[in-house]
Image (cartoon, helix red, strand yellow):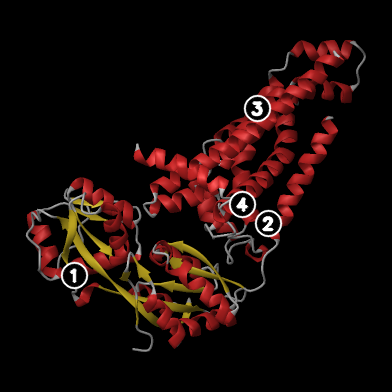
Amino acid sequence: MRKLILHMTLALVLAFACASVAFAAEDIKVGTTTSTADTGLLDYLAPMVLKDTGLTMRWIAVGTGKALEHGKNCDVDVLMVHAPGAEKKFIAEGNGVSRAEFMYNDFVLVGPVKDPAKIKGKGVADSLKAVAAAKAPFASRGDDSGTHKMEKNLWKAASLPVPDKDSWYIGVGQGMLATLRIAAERGAYTLTDRGTWIKYEAKDQGKSGLTILSEGDKALLNQYSVIQLAPKCTNIKHAAAKKLEAWFVSPVGQKAIAAFKLEGKQLFFPNAGK
Amino acid sequence: MDYFSEGLTKAVALLLALDPETFSAVGATASVTALALAVSLLLGLPLGFALGHFRFPGKRGARLFVDWMLSLPTVVIGLIVYAFLTARGPLGEWGLLFTVPGMAVGLTLLGLPIIISMTATAVESTDSRLTDTVLSLGADRWQLLLATLSEARFAMALAAATAFGRIVSEVGIAMMVGGNIKWQTRTITTAIALETGRGEFATGIALGIVLMIVALVVNLLVGLLRGRSSETGRRRA
Protein backbone atom coordinates (compact mmCIF):
# COMPACT_ATOMS: atom_id res chain seq x y z
CA MET A 1 0.00 0.00 0.00
CA ARG A 2 2.70 2.42 1.02
CA LYS A 3 4.61 1.65 -2.18
CA LEU A 4 1.53 2.37 -4.25
CA ILE A 5 1.11 5.74 -2.59
CA LEU A 6 4.76 6.55 -3.17
CA HIS A 7 4.47 5.66 -6.86
CA MET A 8 1.32 7.68 -7.24
CA THR A 9 2.98 10.70 -5.64
CA LEU A 10 6.03 10.40 -7.89
CA ALA A 11 3.83 10.10 -10.99
CA LEU A 12 1.89 13.21 -9.96
CA VAL A 13 5.06 15.22 -9.38
CA LEU A 14 6.46 14.16 -12.75
CA ALA A 15 3.21 15.03 -14.52
CA PHE A 16 3.23 18.51 -13.00
CA ALA A 17 6.89 19.00 -13.88
CA CYS A 18 6.31 18.04 -17.52
CA ALA A 19 3.18 20.18 -17.84
CA SER A 20 5.04 23.20 -16.57
CA VAL A 21 7.87 23.16 -19.10
CA ALA A 22 5.64 22.92 -22.18
CA PHE A 23 5.58 26.42 -23.68
CA ALA A 24 4.21 27.81 -26.93
CA ALA A 25 6.89 28.89 -29.42
CA GLU A 26 5.68 32.38 -30.31
CA ASP A 27 5.45 33.94 -26.86
CA ILE A 28 6.82 37.42 -26.35
CA LYS A 29 7.64 38.69 -22.88
CA VAL A 30 6.58 42.30 -22.43
CA GLY A 31 7.96 44.19 -19.45
CA THR A 32 5.32 46.75 -18.68
CA THR A 33 3.81 48.89 -15.96
CA THR A 34 0.84 48.15 -13.76
CA SER A 35 -1.28 50.81 -15.48
CA THR A 36 -1.43 49.02 -18.85
CA ALA A 37 -2.29 45.71 -17.18
CA ASP A 38 -4.57 46.89 -14.36
CA THR A 39 -6.80 48.95 -16.68
CA GLY A 40 -7.37 45.88 -18.86
CA LEU A 41 -5.77 47.46 -21.96
CA LEU A 42 -3.42 44.53 -22.59
CA ASP A 43 -6.16 41.95 -22.01
CA TYR A 44 -8.16 43.83 -24.64
CA LEU A 45 -5.32 44.15 -27.18
CA ALA A 46 -3.74 40.69 -26.78
CA PRO A 47 -6.22 38.76 -29.00
CA MET A 48 -5.81 41.36 -31.80
CA VAL A 49 -2.01 41.21 -31.54
CA LEU A 50 -2.18 37.42 -31.74
CA LYS A 51 -4.45 37.52 -34.79
CA ASP A 52 -2.37 40.07 -36.71
CA THR A 53 1.17 39.08 -35.75
CA GLY A 54 1.01 35.54 -34.38
CA LEU A 55 2.58 36.77 -31.14
CA THR A 56 1.19 35.82 -27.75
CA MET A 57 1.91 38.67 -25.36
CA ARG A 58 3.02 37.53 -21.91
CA TRP A 59 3.32 40.58 -19.74
CA ILE A 60 5.15 41.11 -16.49
CA ALA A 61 3.47 44.15 -14.96
CA VAL A 62 5.54 45.95 -12.33
CA GLY A 63 6.49 49.54 -11.48
CA THR A 64 8.46 51.37 -14.21
CA GLY A 65 11.67 51.26 -12.14
CA LYS A 66 11.48 47.48 -11.88
CA ALA A 67 10.40 47.08 -15.52
CA LEU A 68 13.48 49.02 -16.67
CA GLU A 69 15.63 46.82 -14.41
CA HIS A 70 14.11 43.73 -16.08
CA GLY A 71 14.97 45.24 -19.47
CA LYS A 72 18.51 46.08 -18.38
CA ASN A 73 19.00 42.46 -17.29
CA CYS A 74 17.57 41.07 -20.58
CA ASP A 75 14.79 39.29 -18.70
CA VAL A 76 12.04 40.46 -21.08
CA ASP A 77 11.90 40.78 -24.88
CA VAL A 78 10.55 44.31 -25.08
CA LEU A 79 9.50 47.16 -22.79
CA MET A 80 6.29 49.20 -22.74
CA VAL A 81 6.70 51.93 -20.14
CA HIS A 82 5.89 55.55 -19.33
CA ALA A 83 8.76 57.56 -17.86
CA PRO A 84 10.41 59.45 -20.76
CA GLY A 85 13.25 60.85 -18.64
CA ALA A 86 14.23 57.49 -17.22
CA GLU A 87 13.76 55.86 -20.64
CA LYS A 88 16.19 58.27 -22.32
CA LYS A 89 18.74 57.63 -19.58
CA PHE A 90 18.14 53.88 -20.04
CA ILE A 91 19.00 54.17 -23.74
CA ALA A 92 21.91 56.55 -23.15
CA GLU A 93 23.43 53.97 -20.81
CA GLY A 94 23.35 51.41 -23.61
CA ASN A 95 20.51 49.27 -22.30
CA GLY A 96 18.14 49.99 -25.18
CA VAL A 97 18.45 51.06 -28.82
CA SER A 98 15.22 52.90 -29.59
CA ARG A 99 12.03 54.19 -28.08
CA ALA A 100 8.85 54.64 -30.08
CA GLU A 101 6.16 56.82 -28.52
CA PHE A 102 2.76 55.33 -29.30
CA MET A 103 0.13 56.62 -26.89
CA TYR A 104 -0.50 58.83 -23.88
CA ASN A 105 -2.95 59.29 -21.11
CA ASP A 106 -2.79 61.91 -18.42
CA PHE A 107 -2.46 62.44 -14.72
CA VAL A 108 -4.90 64.36 -12.54
CA LEU A 109 -4.47 65.96 -9.13
CA VAL A 110 -7.22 64.76 -6.79
CA GLY A 111 -8.00 65.75 -3.24
CA PRO A 112 -10.73 66.16 -0.64
CA VAL A 113 -13.89 67.97 -1.81
CA LYS A 114 -13.35 70.53 1.00
CA ASP A 115 -10.05 71.46 -0.68
CA PRO A 116 -8.24 72.92 2.37
CA ALA A 117 -5.34 74.28 0.25
CA LYS A 118 -7.74 75.97 -2.22
CA ILE A 119 -6.21 74.51 -5.40
CA LYS A 120 -9.37 73.99 -7.48
CA GLY A 121 -8.91 75.33 -11.01
CA LYS A 122 -5.22 76.20 -10.53
CA GLY A 123 -2.43 74.87 -12.74
CA VAL A 124 -0.45 71.98 -11.35
CA ALA A 125 2.61 74.02 -10.27
CA ASP A 126 0.51 76.57 -8.38
CA SER A 127 -1.54 73.74 -6.86
CA LEU A 128 1.54 72.03 -5.43
CA LYS A 129 2.83 75.36 -4.09
CA ALA A 130 -0.51 75.89 -2.34
CA VAL A 131 -0.47 72.36 -0.87
CA ALA A 132 3.07 72.81 0.46
CA ALA A 133 2.30 76.28 1.85
CA ALA A 134 -0.83 75.02 3.63
CA LYS A 135 1.00 71.86 4.79
CA ALA A 136 -2.09 69.97 3.61
CA PRO A 137 -1.68 66.17 3.65
CA PHE A 138 -0.34 64.77 0.36
CA ALA A 139 -0.17 61.04 -0.36
CA SER A 140 2.72 59.97 -2.57
CA ARG A 141 3.20 56.59 -4.25
CA GLY A 142 6.76 56.57 -2.91
CA ASP A 143 7.62 53.42 -4.89
CA ASP A 144 9.73 54.81 -7.76
CA SER A 145 6.92 53.99 -10.19
CA GLY A 146 6.23 56.11 -13.28
CA THR A 147 3.60 57.99 -11.34
CA HIS A 148 6.02 58.65 -8.48
CA LYS A 149 8.69 59.87 -10.91
CA MET A 150 6.12 62.19 -12.49
CA GLU A 151 5.17 63.55 -9.07
CA LYS A 152 8.79 64.27 -8.15
CA ASN A 153 9.30 66.10 -11.45
CA LEU A 154 6.20 68.19 -10.80
CA TRP A 155 7.56 69.34 -7.41
CA LYS A 156 10.83 70.29 -9.10
CA ALA A 157 9.01 72.07 -11.95
CA ALA A 158 7.16 74.10 -9.31
CA SER A 159 10.63 75.01 -7.95
CA LEU A 160 9.93 73.30 -4.65
CA PRO A 161 12.12 70.74 -2.90
CA VAL A 162 10.69 67.23 -3.25
CA PRO A 163 9.05 66.64 0.15
CA ASP A 164 10.34 63.70 2.11
CA LYS A 165 10.24 63.83 5.89
CA ASP A 166 7.63 66.58 6.07
CA SER A 167 4.86 65.57 8.45
CA TRP A 168 2.12 66.29 5.89
CA TYR A 169 3.75 64.13 3.19
CA ILE A 170 2.62 60.48 3.22
CA GLY A 171 4.96 58.10 1.37
CA VAL A 172 2.72 55.11 0.73
CA GLY A 173 5.04 52.69 -1.06
CA GLN A 174 2.16 50.85 -2.74
CA GLY A 175 0.12 50.80 -5.95
CA MET A 176 -2.14 53.62 -7.15
CA LEU A 177 -5.42 52.23 -5.83
CA ALA A 178 -3.93 51.65 -2.40
CA THR A 179 -2.59 55.22 -2.47
CA LEU A 180 -6.01 56.60 -3.44
CA ARG A 181 -7.64 54.71 -0.60
CA ILE A 182 -5.10 56.04 1.87
CA ALA A 183 -5.57 59.57 0.51
CA ALA A 184 -9.31 59.19 1.04
CA GLU A 185 -8.89 57.92 4.61
CA ARG A 186 -6.50 60.74 5.53
CA GLY A 187 -8.19 63.55 3.58
CA ALA A 188 -5.03 63.96 1.49
CA TYR A 189 -4.25 65.23 -2.00
CA THR A 190 -2.58 62.88 -4.45
CA LEU A 191 -1.45 62.55 -8.04
CA THR A 192 -3.05 59.69 -10.00
CA ASP A 193 -3.20 58.44 -13.54
CA ARG A 194 -6.65 58.97 -15.01
CA GLY A 195 -7.20 55.25 -15.67
CA THR A 196 -6.90 54.24 -12.05
CA TRP A 197 -8.97 57.29 -11.08
CA ILE A 198 -11.83 56.29 -13.43
CA LYS A 199 -11.89 52.79 -11.94
CA TYR A 200 -11.72 54.12 -8.40
CA GLU A 201 -14.49 56.62 -9.00
CA ALA A 202 -16.76 54.06 -10.69
CA LYS A 203 -16.53 51.86 -7.61
CA ASP A 204 -16.51 54.56 -5.00
CA GLN A 205 -19.16 56.88 -6.48
CA GLY A 206 -18.00 59.89 -4.52
CA LYS A 207 -18.46 58.23 -1.14
CA SER A 208 -14.86 58.79 -0.05
CA GLY A 209 -14.96 62.54 -0.67
CA LEU A 210 -12.11 62.64 -3.21
CA THR A 211 -12.53 64.63 -6.40
CA ILE A 212 -10.46 65.93 -9.33
CA LEU A 213 -9.09 69.37 -8.46
CA SER A 214 -6.51 70.04 -11.19
CA GLU A 215 -6.44 68.56 -14.69
CA GLY A 216 -5.59 69.33 -18.30
CA ASP A 217 -2.22 70.98 -17.57
CA LYS A 218 0.34 70.08 -20.30
CA ALA A 219 2.77 69.03 -17.57
CA LEU A 220 0.37 66.22 -16.62
CA LEU A 221 0.74 64.35 -19.92
CA ASN A 222 1.80 60.71 -19.51
CA GLN A 223 3.65 59.39 -22.56
CA TYR A 224 3.97 55.64 -23.22
CA SER A 225 6.73 54.18 -25.39
CA VAL A 226 7.87 50.83 -26.72
CA ILE A 227 11.58 50.29 -26.11
CA GLN A 228 13.78 47.92 -28.10
CA LEU A 229 16.50 46.42 -25.95
CA ALA A 230 20.22 46.47 -26.70
CA PRO A 231 21.86 43.81 -28.93
CA LYS A 232 23.93 42.74 -25.89
CA CYS A 233 20.76 40.85 -24.90
CA THR A 234 21.54 37.90 -27.13
CA ASN A 235 19.02 35.63 -25.42
CA ILE A 236 15.87 37.58 -26.30
CA LYS A 237 13.54 37.75 -29.32
CA HIS A 238 14.57 40.99 -31.05
CA ALA A 239 12.66 40.22 -34.28
CA ALA A 240 9.43 39.52 -32.43
CA ALA A 241 9.94 42.70 -30.39
CA LYS A 242 10.19 44.75 -33.62
CA LYS A 243 7.09 43.04 -34.97
CA LEU A 244 5.18 43.96 -31.82
CA GLU A 245 6.30 47.59 -31.99
CA ALA A 246 5.28 47.76 -35.68
CA TRP A 247 1.77 46.64 -34.72
CA PHE A 248 1.43 49.18 -31.91
CA VAL A 249 2.40 52.13 -34.16
CA SER A 250 0.42 50.87 -37.19
CA PRO A 251 -2.99 52.41 -38.06
CA VAL A 252 -4.68 49.16 -36.93
CA GLY A 253 -2.96 49.20 -33.55
CA GLN A 254 -3.52 52.92 -33.04
CA LYS A 255 -7.23 52.58 -33.84
CA ALA A 256 -7.55 49.67 -31.41
CA ILE A 257 -5.95 51.72 -28.62
CA ALA A 258 -8.35 54.63 -29.24
CA ALA A 259 -11.32 52.24 -29.17
CA PHE A 260 -10.48 50.89 -25.71
CA LYS A 261 -12.97 52.14 -23.14
CA LEU A 262 -12.93 51.97 -19.36
CA GLU A 263 -16.29 52.48 -17.64
CA GLY A 264 -17.44 54.00 -20.95
CA LYS A 265 -14.57 56.51 -21.14
CA GLN A 266 -11.61 56.63 -23.55
CA LEU A 267 -8.44 56.27 -21.56
CA PHE A 268 -5.45 56.09 -23.91
CA PHE A 269 -4.86 58.43 -26.84
CA PRO A 270 -2.75 57.08 -29.72
CA ASN A 271 0.02 59.44 -30.87
CA ALA A 272 2.58 57.33 -32.77
CA GLY A 273 4.88 59.35 -35.02
CA LYS A 274 3.66 62.73 -33.75
CA MET B 1 -18.47 42.47 5.70
CA ASP B 2 -19.95 42.96 2.22
CA TYR B 3 -16.62 41.96 0.73
CA PHE B 4 -16.67 38.66 2.55
CA SER B 5 -20.18 37.53 1.61
CA GLU B 6 -19.63 38.74 -1.95
CA GLY B 7 -16.29 36.91 -1.98
CA LEU B 8 -17.86 33.71 -0.70
CA THR B 9 -20.56 33.64 -3.41
CA LYS B 10 -17.96 34.53 -6.01
CA ALA B 11 -15.64 31.72 -4.88
CA VAL B 12 -18.42 29.17 -5.28
CA ALA B 13 -19.34 30.64 -8.68
CA LEU B 14 -15.70 30.53 -9.90
CA LEU B 15 -15.36 26.89 -8.86
CA LEU B 16 -18.73 25.74 -10.22
CA ALA B 17 -18.28 27.55 -13.55
CA LEU B 18 -14.78 25.99 -13.87
CA ASP B 19 -13.50 29.53 -14.52
CA PRO B 20 -10.41 29.03 -16.76
CA GLU B 21 -8.34 31.84 -15.18
CA THR B 22 -8.98 30.53 -11.68
CA PHE B 23 -8.17 26.97 -12.68
CA SER B 24 -5.02 28.10 -14.47
CA ALA B 25 -3.93 29.74 -11.20
CA VAL B 26 -4.87 26.61 -9.24
CA GLY B 27 -2.83 24.56 -11.74
CA ALA B 28 0.20 26.85 -11.43
CA THR B 29 -0.05 26.74 -7.64
CA ALA B 30 -0.36 22.95 -7.69
CA SER B 31 2.59 22.38 -10.02
CA VAL B 32 4.93 24.83 -8.32
CA THR B 33 4.01 23.51 -4.87
CA ALA B 34 4.39 19.86 -5.95
CA LEU B 35 7.79 20.57 -7.50
CA ALA B 36 9.13 22.61 -4.59
CA LEU B 37 7.79 20.21 -1.97
CA ALA B 38 9.15 17.15 -3.80
CA VAL B 39 12.65 18.62 -4.05
CA SER B 40 12.50 19.87 -0.44
CA LEU B 41 11.56 16.38 0.76
CA LEU B 42 14.10 14.57 -1.44
CA LEU B 43 16.94 16.75 -0.14
CA GLY B 44 15.57 17.67 3.26
CA LEU B 45 14.61 14.29 4.70
CA PRO B 46 18.07 12.69 4.30
CA LEU B 47 19.85 15.88 5.39
CA GLY B 48 17.53 16.33 8.37
CA PHE B 49 17.95 12.70 9.31
CA ALA B 50 21.74 12.96 9.09
CA LEU B 51 21.67 16.13 11.16
CA GLY B 52 19.56 14.53 13.87
CA HIS B 53 21.05 11.03 13.86
CA PHE B 54 24.80 11.30 13.44
CA ARG B 55 27.37 12.98 15.63
CA PHE B 56 29.93 14.97 13.69
CA PRO B 57 32.11 18.02 14.25
CA GLY B 58 30.28 21.26 13.48
CA LYS B 59 26.90 19.67 14.11
CA ARG B 60 25.73 22.45 16.41
CA GLY B 61 26.85 25.05 13.90
CA ALA B 62 24.97 23.28 11.10
CA ARG B 63 21.88 23.09 13.26
CA LEU B 64 22.11 26.77 14.13
CA PHE B 65 22.47 27.62 10.44
CA VAL B 66 19.37 25.63 9.44
CA ASP B 67 17.26 27.14 12.22
CA TRP B 68 18.55 30.57 11.26
CA MET B 69 17.45 29.99 7.64
CA LEU B 70 13.90 29.47 8.92
CA SER B 71 13.65 33.21 9.46
CA LEU B 72 14.92 34.26 6.04
CA PRO B 73 12.29 36.70 4.69
CA THR B 74 10.65 35.42 1.51
CA VAL B 75 11.14 38.75 -0.25
CA VAL B 76 14.91 38.36 0.30
CA ILE B 77 14.82 34.78 -1.01
CA GLY B 78 12.98 36.17 -4.03
CA LEU B 79 15.65 38.81 -4.60
CA ILE B 80 18.52 36.35 -4.22
CA VAL B 81 16.92 33.83 -6.58
CA TYR B 82 16.19 36.64 -9.06
CA ALA B 83 19.85 37.70 -8.92
CA PHE B 84 20.88 34.15 -9.82
CA LEU B 85 18.25 33.49 -12.49
CA THR B 86 18.22 36.82 -14.33
CA ALA B 87 19.50 36.51 -17.90
CA ARG B 88 22.69 38.28 -16.80
CA GLY B 89 23.01 36.30 -13.58
CA PRO B 90 25.20 33.22 -13.07
CA LEU B 91 22.37 30.80 -13.96
CA GLY B 92 20.79 33.04 -16.59
CA GLU B 93 21.37 30.69 -19.50
CA TRP B 94 19.09 28.11 -17.90
CA GLY B 95 16.19 30.44 -18.76
CA LEU B 96 14.36 29.75 -15.49
CA LEU B 97 13.25 33.30 -14.65
CA PHE B 98 9.49 33.84 -14.99
CA THR B 99 8.84 30.09 -15.25
CA VAL B 100 7.22 27.57 -12.91
CA PRO B 101 10.47 25.63 -12.31
CA GLY B 102 12.19 28.94 -11.49
CA MET B 103 9.57 29.73 -8.87
CA ALA B 104 10.00 26.20 -7.53
CA VAL B 105 13.70 26.91 -6.97
CA GLY B 106 12.84 29.86 -4.73
CA LEU B 107 10.09 28.02 -2.91
CA THR B 108 12.40 25.06 -2.33
CA LEU B 109 14.74 27.42 -0.48
CA LEU B 110 11.73 28.27 1.68
CA GLY B 111 10.66 24.65 2.27
CA LEU B 112 14.04 23.00 2.68
CA PRO B 113 15.04 24.48 6.07
CA ILE B 114 11.60 23.59 7.48
CA ILE B 115 11.96 19.95 6.42
CA ILE B 116 15.58 19.67 7.60
CA SER B 117 14.97 21.33 10.95
CA MET B 118 11.76 19.46 11.81
CA THR B 119 13.13 16.10 10.65
CA ALA B 120 16.30 16.59 12.69
CA THR B 121 14.24 17.42 15.79
CA ALA B 122 12.02 14.39 15.21
CA VAL B 123 14.97 12.03 14.84
CA GLU B 124 16.75 13.54 17.86
CA SER B 125 13.71 13.09 20.04
CA THR B 126 13.06 9.46 19.19
CA ASP B 127 13.56 7.54 22.38
CA SER B 128 17.27 6.84 22.90
CA ARG B 129 16.30 3.51 24.41
CA LEU B 130 15.15 2.53 20.90
CA THR B 131 18.78 2.31 19.77
CA ASP B 132 19.74 0.06 22.69
CA THR B 133 16.66 -2.12 22.31
CA VAL B 134 17.04 -2.58 18.57
CA LEU B 135 20.78 -3.24 18.83
CA SER B 136 20.31 -5.70 21.71
CA LEU B 137 17.85 -7.58 19.53
CA GLY B 138 20.73 -8.13 17.12
CA ALA B 139 19.82 -5.58 14.48
CA ASP B 140 22.49 -4.31 12.11
CA ARG B 141 23.00 -0.61 11.36
CA TRP B 142 20.58 -0.59 8.42
CA GLN B 143 17.84 -2.10 10.53
CA LEU B 144 18.53 0.49 13.23
CA LEU B 145 18.17 3.20 10.61
CA LEU B 146 14.86 1.79 9.41
CA ALA B 147 13.56 1.51 12.97
CA THR B 148 14.47 5.14 13.69
CA LEU B 149 12.86 6.28 10.45
CA SER B 150 9.72 4.36 11.21
CA GLU B 151 9.53 5.91 14.69
CA ALA B 152 9.96 9.42 13.31
CA ARG B 153 7.61 9.13 10.35
CA PHE B 154 4.67 11.04 11.82
CA ALA B 155 6.87 13.93 12.75
CA MET B 156 8.25 13.91 9.21
CA ALA B 157 4.70 13.96 7.83
CA LEU B 158 4.09 16.99 10.03
CA ALA B 159 7.23 18.61 8.60
CA ALA B 160 5.92 18.00 5.08
CA ALA B 161 2.51 19.46 5.98
CA THR B 162 4.15 22.55 7.50
CA ALA B 163 6.37 23.09 4.46
CA PHE B 164 3.34 22.59 2.20
CA GLY B 165 1.45 25.29 4.07
CA ARG B 166 4.31 27.76 3.79
CA ILE B 167 4.95 27.05 0.09
CA VAL B 168 1.35 27.05 -1.09
CA SER B 169 0.60 30.38 0.60
CA GLU B 170 3.81 32.20 -0.38
CA VAL B 171 3.51 35.38 -2.45
CA GLY B 172 6.83 37.35 -2.39
CA ILE B 173 8.99 34.77 -4.15
CA ALA B 174 6.18 33.82 -6.53
CA MET B 175 5.74 37.47 -7.54
CA MET B 176 9.43 38.36 -7.89
CA VAL B 177 10.67 35.19 -9.60
CA GLY B 178 7.46 34.15 -11.35
CA GLY B 179 6.45 37.58 -12.63
CA ASN B 180 2.71 36.86 -12.25
CA ILE B 181 2.33 36.04 -15.96
CA LYS B 182 -1.24 35.22 -16.94
CA TRP B 183 -1.83 31.55 -17.90
CA GLN B 184 1.76 30.67 -16.91
CA THR B 185 3.13 31.77 -13.58
CA ARG B 186 0.06 33.40 -12.06
CA THR B 187 -0.58 31.44 -8.88
CA ILE B 188 -3.55 31.86 -6.59
CA THR B 189 -1.57 34.08 -4.22
CA THR B 190 -0.14 36.38 -6.91
CA ALA B 191 -3.61 36.59 -8.46
CA ILE B 192 -4.93 37.68 -5.04
CA ALA B 193 -2.21 40.35 -4.85
CA LEU B 194 -3.16 41.53 -8.36
CA GLU B 195 -6.89 41.67 -7.65
CA THR B 196 -6.25 43.52 -4.38
CA GLY B 197 -4.08 46.03 -6.26
CA ARG B 198 -6.89 46.48 -8.73
CA GLY B 199 -9.33 47.15 -5.92
CA GLU B 200 -11.28 43.94 -6.65
CA PHE B 201 -11.40 42.96 -2.99
CA ALA B 202 -14.28 40.49 -3.37
CA THR B 203 -12.46 38.60 -6.15
CA GLY B 204 -9.35 38.55 -3.94
CA ILE B 205 -11.30 37.02 -1.08
CA ALA B 206 -12.92 34.55 -3.48
CA LEU B 207 -9.48 33.39 -4.62
CA GLY B 208 -8.37 33.20 -0.99
CA ILE B 209 -11.28 30.88 -0.28
CA VAL B 210 -10.35 28.78 -3.33
CA LEU B 211 -6.80 28.46 -1.95
CA MET B 212 -8.14 27.42 1.45
CA ILE B 213 -10.33 24.77 -0.23
CA VAL B 214 -7.37 23.40 -2.21
CA ALA B 215 -5.27 23.28 0.99
CA LEU B 216 -8.11 21.55 2.86
CA VAL B 217 -8.37 18.85 0.18
CA VAL B 218 -4.60 18.23 0.35
CA ASN B 219 -4.64 18.07 4.15
CA LEU B 220 -7.60 15.66 4.10
CA LEU B 221 -5.70 13.42 1.67
CA VAL B 222 -2.61 13.49 3.88
CA GLY B 223 -4.76 12.75 6.91
CA LEU B 224 -6.25 9.78 5.07
CA LEU B 225 -2.77 8.46 4.24
CA ARG B 226 -1.65 8.87 7.85
CA GLY B 227 -4.73 7.02 9.06
CA ARG B 228 -4.02 4.12 6.71
CA SER B 229 -0.33 3.84 7.47
CA SER B 230 -0.90 3.94 11.25
CA GLU B 231 -3.43 1.11 10.83
CA THR B 232 -0.96 -1.08 8.94
CA GLY B 233 1.62 -0.20 11.58
CA ARG B 234 -0.68 -1.37 14.33
CA ARG B 235 -1.53 -4.56 12.47
CA ARG B 236 2.13 -5.42 12.16
CA ALA B 237 2.74 -4.75 15.81
Question: How far across and down, in percent of the image, does residue A122 sit?
Answer: 10, 69
Q: Relative to B137, is B211 above or below?
A: below
Q: Are marks 4 and 2 in contact (CB under 8 Å)?
A: yes
Q: Relative to B191, is B223 above or below?
A: above
Q: Pointer 2: what residue?
A: A20
Quarter location, residue B41: top right
Circle 2: residue type: Ser
Front one among B139 and B164? B164
| Distance (Cα) linking label 4 and label 2 | 8 Å
| Distance (Cα) linking label 1 and label 2 | 47 Å
- Callout 2 crowding tier (Cα within 10 Å): few <14, some 14–19, many ≥20: some
Q: Pointer 4: what residue?
A: B28
Name the disc covering residue B158, or none. 3
Same chain? Circles 4 and 1: no
Question: How far across and down, in percent of the image, does residue A272 sit?
Answer: 38, 85
Chain letter of the residue beneath label 2 in the structure image: A
Which of discs 3 and 4 lies nearer the camera? The answer is: 4
Name the disc covering residue A215, or none. 1
Helix, strand or loop status at disc 3: helix
Same chain? Circles 4 and 2: no
Question: How far across and down, in percent of the image, does residue B54 sit?
Answer: 75, 26
Marked residue nearer the N-terminal end (3 or 4): 4
Chain letter of the residue beneath label 3 in the structure image: B
Helix, strand or loop status at disc 1: loop
